[in-house]
Image (cartoon, rainbow, N blue to C red):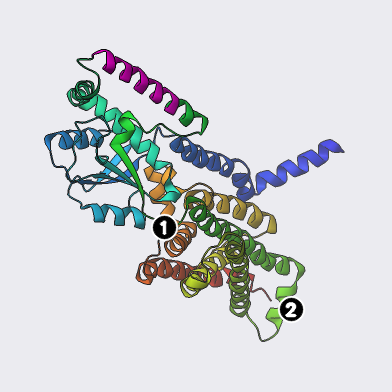
């Protein structure tokens, strides 16, 4: 008997080509996508978009920028032609992951920490990981491409502080070294980096007025909202298949109604449900973490409405394209995982390889998350949200049209 049950289930799986593919092909595809994302996030394939403004414009700064341009993990934007304000704007808008400004009136030749730091690292707190990565690449390029400058700076430091020492100077050196040692030990205990030496090459500047914690909350409010929006929309759309299996659709079609009316009604319900679901998440973010929802209510509402409509359209396409509830559940779960992974709901997109970042633009997650981040931490003008709204609305309309056409197969009287 057990063998017969096993054989029946095996034959059922082999005959259902869709279930067979979703059981053995799609899991491998999901693995490949996540492997590409997290291998890229380790830094070996990650490429930072770096906006550069050269206010020094010396042969030394040119050499350093050229060395940075040869780093495979960096992609320079502007190549010294940008102004400092333009660099800050690119980082603020998210076009660049981090900015590098060569401060006008300074020099790269001095290592002693006298005067302002010659390099300014411009960052968005939400992408704080990009700053130490760029700082490490700059230091590496400084030593590898400018060894004469680095050594000259050391010599200058020695000439200014330590050469031609008499007894009093020797004592000063010993006291100075003791102070440096104590400062370094204190820095280690506090979990920070001592500000002496090459650290004086850098000065960090955050272009966003809010804290990194606040920006991360704003980001993941949108990311998690879109993720669960897709799951809830699909769950609601699958009821269409349950109604078909139970014969409810046959009774509806026997009356004056038709499948178009049924699809439209479900679409409106899923949009309203998704809007309220996202509202709950953002109200919590406002009440607990201080996200400025009341100050951005209108752009938030339009973004949420179009995102909910796009999710509803996609969910109805999945439901009408599948013939059984099992097929729809399996396909939707895999599709949502893929869309959410590529779209930034699970991992921020700037940590992904370039190819996956570009592919992410085909997902509703990317457009919705970009709109929410533009609203809640970049404070961008409403005009910058028009393109995401159009894309999400167009996706909703296309999904509704396709779902209505596919649903005609159920019109069996």
- Image quarter of residue 244: bottom right
| 103 is higher (above) or lower (below) than 311 | above
Of marks 1 and 2, which one's residue comes earlier in the chain? Answer: 1
**Which numbered dot is residue 251?**
2
In the drawing, does residue 134 fall left or right of residue 55? right
Q: Secondary structure at mark 1?
A: loop
From the viewer's side, name the closer residue of 114 and 209.
114
Q: Which residues are magenta?
A: 166-183
> How many numbered marks does the figure carry?
2
Residue 154, percent from left and from top: 23, 22
**Which numbered dot is residue 209?**
1
Can residue 401 be seen in this snapshot?
A: no
From the viewer's side, name the closer residue of 143 and 360.
143
Residue, far bottom: 256
Q: Residue at x 62, y 76 (%)?
A: 259
What secondary structure is the stretch in magenta mostly built from?
Answer: helix
Residue, far front: 168
Q: Residue at x 23, y 20 (%)?
A: 158
Q: Secondary structure at mark 2?
A: helix
Q: Residue at x 66, y 62 (%)?
A: 235
Residue, far top: 167
Circles 1, 2 touching at the beta carbon (< 8 Å): no
In the drawing, does residue 37 fall left or right of residue 7? left
| 173 is higher (above) or lower (below) than 378 | above
Q: Point out the frontmost of discs 1 and 2.
A: 1
Residue, far right: 1
């Amino acid at each position: 008997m057990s063998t017969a049950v096993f054989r029946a289930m095996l034959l059922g799986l082999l005959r259902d080509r869709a279930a067979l593919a979703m059981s053995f092909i799609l899991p491998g595809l999901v693995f490949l996508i996540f492997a590409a994302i997290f291998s890229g996030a380790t830094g070996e394939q990650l490429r930072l978009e770096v906006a550069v403004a050269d206010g020094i414009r010396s042969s030394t700064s040119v050499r350093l920028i050229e060395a940075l341009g040869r780093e495979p993990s960096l992609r320079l934007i502007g190549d010294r032609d940008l102004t400092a304000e333009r660099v800050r704007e690119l980082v603020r808008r998210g076009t660049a992951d981090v900015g590098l400004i060569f401060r006008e009136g300074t020099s790269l030749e001095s290592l002693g920490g006298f005067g302002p730091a010659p390099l300014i690292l411009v960052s968005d707190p939400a992408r704080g990981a990009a700053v130490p990565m760029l700082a490490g690449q700059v230091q590496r390029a400084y030593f590898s491409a400018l060894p004469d400058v680095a050594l000259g700076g050391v010599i200058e430091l020695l000439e200014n502080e330590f050469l031609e020492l008499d007894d009093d100077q020797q004592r000063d050196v010993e006291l100075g070294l003791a102070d440096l040692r104590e400062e370094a030990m204190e820095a280690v205990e506090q979990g920070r980096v001592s500000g002496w030496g090459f650290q004086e090459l850098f000065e960090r500047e955050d272009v966003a007025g809010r804290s990194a914690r606040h920006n991360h909350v704003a980001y993941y409010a949108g990311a998690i909202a879109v993720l669960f929006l897709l799951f809830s929309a699909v769950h609601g759309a699958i009821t269409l298949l349950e109604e078909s299996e139970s014969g409810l659709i046959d009774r509806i079609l026997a009356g004056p109604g038709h499948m178009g009316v049924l699809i439209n009604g479900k679409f409106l319900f899923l949009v309203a449900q998704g809007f309220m679901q996202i509202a709950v998440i953002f109200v919590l973010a406002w009440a607990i973490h201080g996200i400025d929802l009341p100050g951005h209510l209108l752009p938030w509402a339009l973004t949420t409405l179009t995102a909910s409509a796009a999710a509803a359209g996609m969910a109805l396409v999945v439901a009408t394209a599948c013939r059984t509830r099992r097929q729809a559940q399996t396909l939707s779960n895999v599709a949502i995982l893929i869309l959410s992974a590529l779209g930034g709901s699970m991992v921020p997109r700037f940590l992904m390889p370039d190819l996956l970042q570009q592919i992410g633009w085909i997902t509703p997650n990317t457009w919705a998350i970009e709109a929410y981040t533009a609203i809640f931490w970049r404070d961008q003008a409403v005009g910058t949200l028009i393109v995401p709204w159009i894309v999400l609305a167009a996706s909703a309309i296309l999904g509704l049209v396709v779902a209505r056409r596919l649903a005609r197969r159920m019109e069996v009287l």
